[in-house]
């Protein structure tokens, strides 16, 4: 046998391929997978939320509530909000939650319903309200979100993640804690329908507690025309929107024959107590 | 946004420079392989040749370290998700092995044949076996023999 050295014509160990083509193909594939998961999670929100017990909700709330409670400072206004919440719940809005009001220093005119009955009220809102009835309506509105469990839906896809993680790894695990920390809880999104339902709930609560509905629409009428409506949280999605909500409330007031009477004033030092 | 920009820059640097480096390397590999065609490197362990005609037999080795570039690594990590052949690493290993063989042949000088050739690979660098840009080392070794006709 004679040995003739020769160079191989082709390289069998390297696949002749365009790396750029592979790059784009794989990236597109990954993007597709992400989009499908995103859509599925969106659908899962509506599947998951009605099945969550209040107990599980409280446990999930425990994941991030500590960071919120840490910022709490005892104040007269907080006590006032808390007692108003308890009064509303005891007498009218009997929901399976232990409501807790948290006051947060911020110029935003907003209140947020967090899982587990924790309602965060910004000082910007407290400075704007002029009567107890008005504040009660706002709190009733948040309670309305609890009644329809919008507060869980509002957290959206992130909530599905946290629920799955809480069920799989428990609420003590680092994974659940990490997920909860990454959640931007102040950016809840509600649909118009959810807001309208919460408004209706608040109106019922107001009528039940005070025997009249004075002050119900006060808050919506307050939005200054020149001010950026973005600061006004979910109470004022846009100008025409808040007018629609006012007229919707007035329609209900007329058709249900709700009475109007004197508004209950806020405590005297309301605006001085800046916390 | 800045992170993404940084990432895209690394990827494009990896792609452009990596592709150029690979092309140049392959060209040099081809040329040197042609030059060393007369020196066979085989894996047989025993050579049936009269002892008195074996002038010398000694260990020769060559090793080469090739770095992974950012683009290749990203492509591979995408592959990790979907599975399949990691084509982007194939050329790296191929280059490292052939370069190692060539260096071994260079060390052999005027040998007639290199027998009992083995090739081994390993990853080196702080981040070897972990995520991150690592390096690949290939080492080829064998016994270079000078035989009298």
Image (spheres, rainbow, N blue to C red):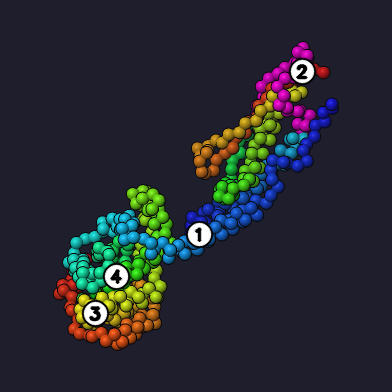
Q: Mark 3–mark 1 contact, CB under 8 Å? A: no
Mark nearer the viewer, 1 or 2: 1
Which residue does the image show at 68% across and 25% down from the upper left?
B142
Q: Is residue B96 above or below residue A260?
A: above
Q: Which of disc 4 and disc 3 is earlier in sequence?
A: 4
Question: Do the residues indicated by labels 2 and 3 lie within the same chain of the protein?
Answer: no
Q: Report helix, strand or loop for mark 1.
A: helix
Q: Which residue is mark 3?
A: A207
Mark nearer the viewer, 3 or 1: 3
Chain bearing mark 3 = A
Image-quadrant location for residue A198? bottom left
Chain bearing mark 4 = A
Q: Report helix, strand or loop for mark 3.
A: helix
Q: Which residue is mark 1?
A: A37
Q: Which residue is mark 4?
A: A143
Chain bearing mark 2 = B
Q: Range of the magenta residues?
A: B35-62
* Residue B48's disc number: 2
Mark nearer the viewer, 2 or 4: 4
């Amino acid at each position: 046998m004679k040995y003739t050295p020769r160079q191989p014509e082709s390289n069998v160990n390297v696949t002749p391929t365009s790396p750029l083509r592979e790059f784009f193909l794989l990236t597109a594939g990954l993007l597709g997978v992400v989009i499908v998961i995103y859509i599925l999670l969106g659908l899962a929100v509506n599947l998951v939320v009605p099945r969550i017990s209040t107990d599980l909700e409280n446990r999930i709330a425990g994941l991030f509530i500590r960071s919120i409670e840490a910022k709490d400072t005892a104040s007269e206004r907080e006590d006032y909000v808390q007692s108003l919440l308890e009064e509303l719940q005891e007498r009218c809005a009997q929901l399976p939650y232990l409501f807790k009001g948290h006051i947060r220093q911020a110029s935003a005119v907003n209140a947020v319903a967090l899982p587990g009955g924790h309602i965060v009220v910004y000082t910007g809102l407290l400075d704007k309200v002029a009567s107890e009835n008005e504040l009660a309506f706002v709190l009733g509105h948040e309670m309305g979100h609890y009644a329809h469990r919008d507060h869980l839906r509002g957290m959206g896809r992130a909530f599905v993640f946290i629920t799955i993680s809480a069920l799989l790894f428990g609420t003590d695990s680092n994974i659940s804690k990490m997920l909860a920390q990454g959640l931007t809880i102040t950016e809840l999104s509600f649909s118009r329908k959810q807001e309208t339902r919460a408004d209706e709930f608040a109106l019922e609560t107001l009528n039940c507690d005070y025997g009249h509905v004075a002050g119900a629409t006060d808050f919506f009428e307050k939005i200054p025309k020149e001010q950026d409506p973005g600061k006004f949280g979910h109470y004022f999605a846009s100008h025409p929107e808040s007018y629609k909500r006012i007229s919707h409330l007035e329609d209900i007031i007329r058709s249900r024959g709700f009475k109007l009477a004197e508004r209950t004033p806020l405590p005297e030092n309301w605006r001085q107590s800046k916390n | 946004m800045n992170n993404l920009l940084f990432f895209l820059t690394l990827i494009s640097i990896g792609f452009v420079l990596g592709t150029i480096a690979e092309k140049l390397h392959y060209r040099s590999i081809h040329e040197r392989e042609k030059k060393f065609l007369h020196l066979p490197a085989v894996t047989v362990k025993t050579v049936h040749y009269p002892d008195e005609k074996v002038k010398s037999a000694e260990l020769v080795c060559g090793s080469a370290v090739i770095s992974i570039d950012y683009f290749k690594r990203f492509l591979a990590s995408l592959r990790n998700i979907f599975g399949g052949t990691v084509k982007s690493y194939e050329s790296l290993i191929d280059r490292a092995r052939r370069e190692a063989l060539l260096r071994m042949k260079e060390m052999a000088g005027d040998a007639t044949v290199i027998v009992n050739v083995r090739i081994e690979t390993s990853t080196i660098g702080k981040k070897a076996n972990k995520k991150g840009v690592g390096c690949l080392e290939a080492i080829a070794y064998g016994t270079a023999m000078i035989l009298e006709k």
